[in-house]
Amino acid sequence: MEQMPHDRPRPASRLSRRFLALLAAACAGAATLGAHAQWTTQPVSAPGVEYRTFSSAAAGTTVSYHIFLPPAYAAQPSARFPVLYWLHGSGGPTQGIAQVAGYFASGMAQGRIPPMLVVIPNGMSYSMWCDSKDGVVPMETVVIDDLIPHIDATFRTIPQRSGRILDGFSMGGAGTARLGFRRPDLFAGVSMLGAGPLQDDFLEEPLGGSTSEQLRLAIYEMVWGSDPRYYLAQNPKTIVTDRAEAVIAAQIRVRQGIGSLDALVPMNEEFSALLKALGIAHDFTVLTGLGHNAGAVLNGLGQANWDFYNAALAIPCRLAADIDCSGAVDAADLSLVLASWGESDGPADLDGNGFVDAADLTQVLSKWGTVP
């Protein structure tokens, strides 16, 4: 275009000036969030809940978590228990711990689900349960490589995939998809409740969403380095597409649940359609009249919620004697029988007679070396 006489560079538009100001503020906010990354929280007091810490190699420091221990854990000192990992939503790592623990405690007391440990990791306020691009907050690695082995070494768990369930809400719902679909060898069930973010562009605010533009930009910078390629690489949709074959082979129990008034419904519908296209069996429930609230969604699912946990824990290995679901009957299975000797029920009770005894040992030895 022909330049007018004495033409000067035009000043930035009001929109671009506002965006640049927001971006600068967001970067400053991201730096503040990262600098104040709290790997340990204050303890939460609730019935059956304990505050614990462990040394994380990935974080390079001490990391905290809360764990609910059912009464049966103390009453049955030789028994082993399944573990449900609950990934919390954004805004505060200790919010809702007492309510979540109370909900599951009630279900166990009513016999709706078997006694299990409920671990609530510290996911900070806005980690998105993702390894940050700059390496400051390697949250996914902390949970997968450090926390889970620590739990299995510290408590009497069922230390294999058939004894673990991954569940979470909002940020935690998206986190369960990321962690669970990336590592289908670790979990029998993956539950996504009110899950988000799942969209292709994190800066695209869902219609009816309430996250401010400045906070969204700050999270985008802190977690994904404002890099759309890194964001997409860590997006649950990318991960499940890449890992679909392994997810199907593992026979993981998968479900989505969300309130009909939740602004994240469209992206959850899109994710459900993707799972269907990939051939991944799952349940998708939209609860009429409910918004973005974890307690409301859990209660709204009713008996179906308990059915999900029971069904996930009931997924058998391809061969009963392969107790740890490793793909072969070996020394690890023998060790599980011997460690559970004389216990009532449990995964090592292969013949279902109510006790781990010589008959179960015989089954393992008769299948020794078998690859299912």
Image (tube, rainbow, N blue to C red):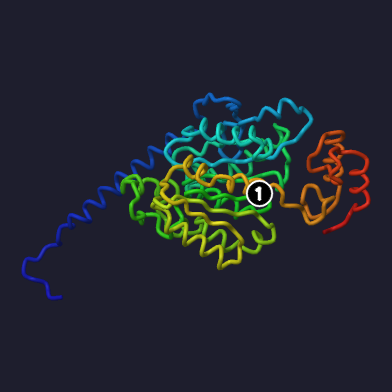
Q: Position of residue 189 (x, y in %)?
A: 63, 50
Quadrant in the picture for residue 56: top right
Q: What is the tally of numbered marks visible in this picture?
A: 1
Relative vertical location of residue 135 with respect to residue 230 in this rendering, above or below: above
Residue 63 visible in the snapshot: no
Q: Give the residue type that dot 1 points to.
A: Phe
Quadrant in the picture for residue 10: bottom left
Q: Quadrant of the C terminus?
A: bottom right
User: SS at mark 1?
Assistant: loop
* Front position in the image: 302 or 320: 302
- Which residue has dot 1 on it? 187
Say which residue appears at 57% left-offset and 49% top-offset: 191
* Front position in the image: 257 or 109: 109
Q: Position of residue 78 (x, y in %)?
A: 79, 30
Relative vertical location of residue 358 with respect to residue 198 in this rendering, above or below: above
Residue 336 visible in the snapshot: yes
Q: Position of residue 97 (x, y in %)?
A: 52, 32
Q: Position of residue 224 (x, y in %)?
A: 44, 51
> Please, which residue is most extreme toward the bottom here?
1
Say which residue appears at 71% left-offset and 25% top-offset: 74
